[in-house]
Amino acid sequence: MAHKAGFVNIIGNPNVGKSTLMNAFVGEKLSIITSKAQTTRHRILGIVNGDDFQILFSDTPGIIKPAYELQESMMDFVKSAFEDADILVYMVEIGEKALKDEAFFKKITNSEIPILLLLNKIDTSDQQKLEEQVQLWKEKVPNAEIYPISALEGFQVNEVFNRIIELLPESPPFYPKDQLTDKPERFFINESIREKILLHYKKEIPYAVEVETEEFHEEEKIIRIRSVIMVERDTQKGIIIGHKGSALKRVGVEARKDLEKFFGKKIHLELYVKVNKNWRSNQNQLKRFGYN
Ligand SMILES: Nc1nc2c(ncn2[C@@H]2O[C@H](COP(=O)(O)OP(=O)(O)OP(=O)(O)O)[C@@H](O)[C@H]2O)c(=O)[nH]1
Ligand SMILES: [Mg+2]
């Protein structure tokens, strides 16, 4: 049989479960997951390899109306996911409202490529509501195949995976067969730390934070890491650090545990906080942090 390979790009509103699904497909925690919207800021490739196939999943930021430069570059990642997709996975959740961007929605309904519309979080729904929702989405996106799923509980995830394999175009692999992602180690360190900040701080704080890993030094038995948490203002710096450093310490302890699992090695993690005024609206800073 001929080899199959292609880009399967996951798009949808914020917080619907896109990252949860990609991690389930890949079997690794490549993308961070929290209950807050705009958890994912990048396009993250997750590669699933078989003897005769290679699926290049892309997790993308949730679709929003951008209010500042960072969000514009997040939406550029979504745009790029529309451009190179061989199969588009459009994820919605039970009871959600319309996509926040009409133009993106038109791209989906006018799409020439296969669309799998995944109605996620059905573990939170009853049968009647589910049937109503399926009917609704059939009318809204008639060109899609609809699959009710639960990414969290793994319900119907295999069925969707098998359908993706069927739909994949014939192609040689795009990446070496032992490669898992396109992102470097430092990216996953930054993201682990950012996840803890999303989990433990309120309101605007997580959105004002970017993380940069300055040092990554692997020794035989331990990896030594130093990362800086960047905030936009002095007051935010104080909040991140907390009383006698307690808040920052909690972030460090929890991120270190995740990273030890991810790298399978003991980790020494040093964190500090720096003010980087208005980095979210500064093109040069954004470029440096890997946003286009
Ligand atoms: N009940 C339930 N919760 C889910 C399911 N899938 C994801 N979630 C939860 O929904 C929340 C958002 O999940 P994410 O995977 O981060 O969603 P996302 O679409 O990647 O979000 P952004 O990156 O912010 O756009 C988390 O609290 C998940 O645990 C599901 O099938 N059922
Ligand atoms: Mg996400």
Image: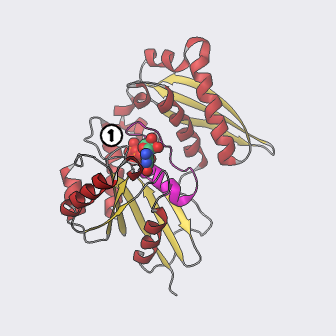
Q: Which residues are magenta?
A: 18-45
Task: Check the image and name the residue furthest to the right.
Answer: 220
* Coordinates of residue 227 in the picture (x, y in percent): 60, 32
Per the image, label 1 sits on a secondary structure element best described as helix
Q: Is residue 240 left or right of residue 160?
A: right
Q: Is mark 1 within 8 Å of ligand 1?
A: no
Q: Quadrant of residue 251?
A: top right
* Foreground of the two, 136 or 90: 136
The secondary structure that most of the magenta stretch takes on is loop
Three-letter amino acid code at disc 1?
Answer: Gln
**Which residue appears farthest toward the bottom when viewing the image?**
1
Looking at the picture, tell me which residue is in the foreground, 212 or 177.
177
Residue at position x 37%, y 38% in the image: 37
Look at the image and tell me whether residue 156 can be seen: yes
**Among the 4 quarters of the image, the one containing residue 168:** bottom left
Ligand 1 located in image quadrant: top left
**Residue at the spot of label 1:** 71
Q: Is residue 291 visible?
A: no
